[in-house]
Structures are given as C-alpha cells and as structure tokens.
Amino acid sequence: MTLDCYLHDNESMVKEVTAFAANPQREISAFVSQEARGRVEVPRGYTRILYILEGAARVEIDGDTADYQAGHLFLTNARTKIAYEEQEQTAVISFYFKDSYFTDSLLTQFAEEQQLYRFFVEAISEEFRHTSRYMIFHFAQMTDVHVYSLLLLKQVVKMYYFNNKVTKAAFVLLIVEISQGADQALVKKDRYVANDQLIEEVLAYIDTMIRTIKLEETAEYFHFHPNYLSALLKEKTGQTFTEIVLHKRIQLAKKNLLQTNLSVQEIVEHLGYKDKAFFYKKFKQAVGTTPRAYRMQYKEEK
C-alpha cells in the first residue's frame, strides 16, 4: 500500500490542505515538500508542526524572515502566519492538526511536559484564537526528534491520514522528545506574554525598584500604556498600582523596623518618601499604629 505525500509547490500544498479541511473524518495530515518551487504558504487555521528534514530553507514567520537548517522544528498555532522557500536538496515535513485531534485523553498523555502541554491546550482555546503563538527549536540531526518525526509521518501516511491509536502514540512520542530537550533547543518564540506571567514580572520589578518606582516608568519598561497596566493590575490583583506599591513599602518598613537599627526617618527615606508625615499616616491606617510604636511593641513582646 502506497500513498504519495510529496508536494513540489504551493499549489499542491493548498490543494492537499483544502482536501484535508473538507473531510470531517480526517483530524491529522502530513506532507513532505521536496525541493519545492517558489514560496510555499503554510495554510492557517490549524495547529502545525514543521520540521526541516534535510537541507535549508528561508522561513518567514509573522513577518520575520531568517534562514534555517535541517533539524529546525516550528510549532505554531492556527493564527501564526508561516511561509518558506526551500533551497536545493531540501525537504520539509508539515503536520496539520484540527482542534478535534486534541482530545482530553490525548493531552493527558503528556500533561507532565508542562510547556508543550500548555501550548497545545492554549492552541485550541478561544482565548488565543486571535493571538499568534509559536516556538522554534533546533535539534541535532539524527536525534530521536528526527526519528519520531519520520515515524509520525510514516504512520499518518500509512493510515491514509486517518487517526488511530498508533498514530496518536507516535505523536505523543514526538512531543515528549521535543519537550525533553526544549530548554536547550529553543531558539525563538512569539512575543506574547500571558497576563499571569506578566503580573508576576511586574510585581518582581516593583520589588526591585521599590524606592523610585513610578507607574509611567513601569509601563514604559513593559511597553504598555500606563492606563492599561494599571487596569490590568487591578483586574488581576484587586489592587491599583499605587495600592500595591504602598503595601510593599509598608511590608518592607515593618521588616526594617524589626530587623535593623535604622531610624524611622532613615527607613522612610530608604523607601523613597520625602514626606514623612504622609507615610506615617498610611502606615498607621494599614497597621493600626505608628512606625515607632510598632517597633517598641515588638521589643516589649520580646
């Protein structure tokens, strides 16, 4: 039993992917473009894995173009725009996945591979339907990633592109193998930062710059408008930027009052306040007593 999976130009790629889209029984497809003529557009609307099997190609991904060699692997969601031009003696494997392919039972098989598990979960979620997400890896040729890419290709073609348990097993093997070397092999990823991760980074930045922190400068550092960053912080933490900074300064003041011999004036200045009376007022509102009384109470309790 044979089935031709080789393509040689953009027209044949479009034709095959159109046929894949029109067949409700097909959830996964795989093709090899070999010494393709001209530019090959990789149709959007599917989660895709591209692997340069041999040779080299100039790849454009979301407007950024660079040269990639055998061993480079591209993992993209349905939104990412990707196209390539092959050089001589080049072959590129393309895998296409419909959302229905990623069942809960399949995803749980590599749930421990957190980075890639999260990628595939997000790839089929409505939240990221309009957000491009991709990761680019480079693996040495003849690693298991190379072997498992060929294994998955063979299985998909053998089954006439229809899904079965062995095909899913081959997919899981490939994903786990990619995950094992992901930290060392990752060469580029999209610029998207998840809101939860962004908030963690903003809070860490506030800790670092607590003495001189300002909303405008923080927003500029993270490339956001101040109003957007302030609204995002309020949504995710329940506190405004000002409230977060004040809380962190009070916590730091309490620590310094109990663990150092710095005067209250020195502590207030260290926190970036020029108006001692203002900080005293905010401290008493939050803690229920003045800084000096807080320190004395701690000493008496000891």
Image (cartoon, grey):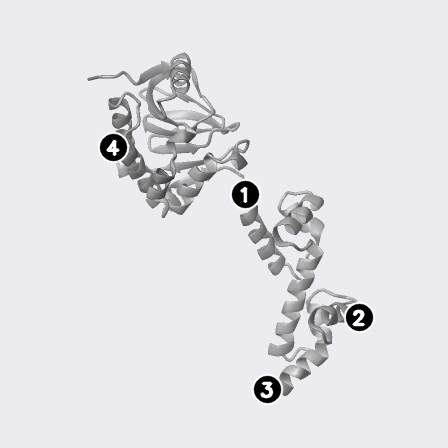
Visible in this render: residue 181?
A: no
Distance between the alpha carbons at the discs numbered 4 and 1:
35 Å
- Crowding near pointer 1: few (<14 within 10 Å), some, many (20+)? few
Q: Quadrant of residue 46?
A: top left
The Cα atoms of the two marked residues, 3 and 4, are separated by 68 Å
* Cα distance in 3D space between marks 2 and 1: 40 Å
Vertical order, 125 against 41 (above or below): below
According to the picture, the residue beneath numbered tag 4 turns out to be 166
Location of mark 2 (residue): 277
Q: Residues within 10 Å of mark 2 (few under 14, many from 20)?
A: few
Q: Which residue is mark 1?
A: 193
**Location of residue 52 by image quarter:** top left
Q: Is residue 104 above or below residue 234?
A: above
Disc number lying in front (2 or 4): 4
Q: Mark 2 or mark 3, which has the lower sequence index? A: 2
Secondary structure under tag 1 reads loop
The answer to whether 155 appears left or right of 301 in the picture is: left
Q: Nearer the viewer, mark 3 or mark 1?
A: 3
Mark 2 to mark 4 CA distance (whole Å): 72 Å
Q: Which is closer to the viewer, label 2 or label 3?
A: 3
Residue 212 is situated, as x and y percent measured from the top left of the image, at 69, 59
Front residue of 88 and 189: 189
Residue at the spot 68% in from the left edge and 44% down from the top edge: 228
Seen in the picture, residue 83 relative to 290 is either above or below; the reply is above
- Between residue 199 and residue 125, name the one nearer to us: 125
Q: Decide: marks 2, 4 in contact (CB < 8 A)?
A: no
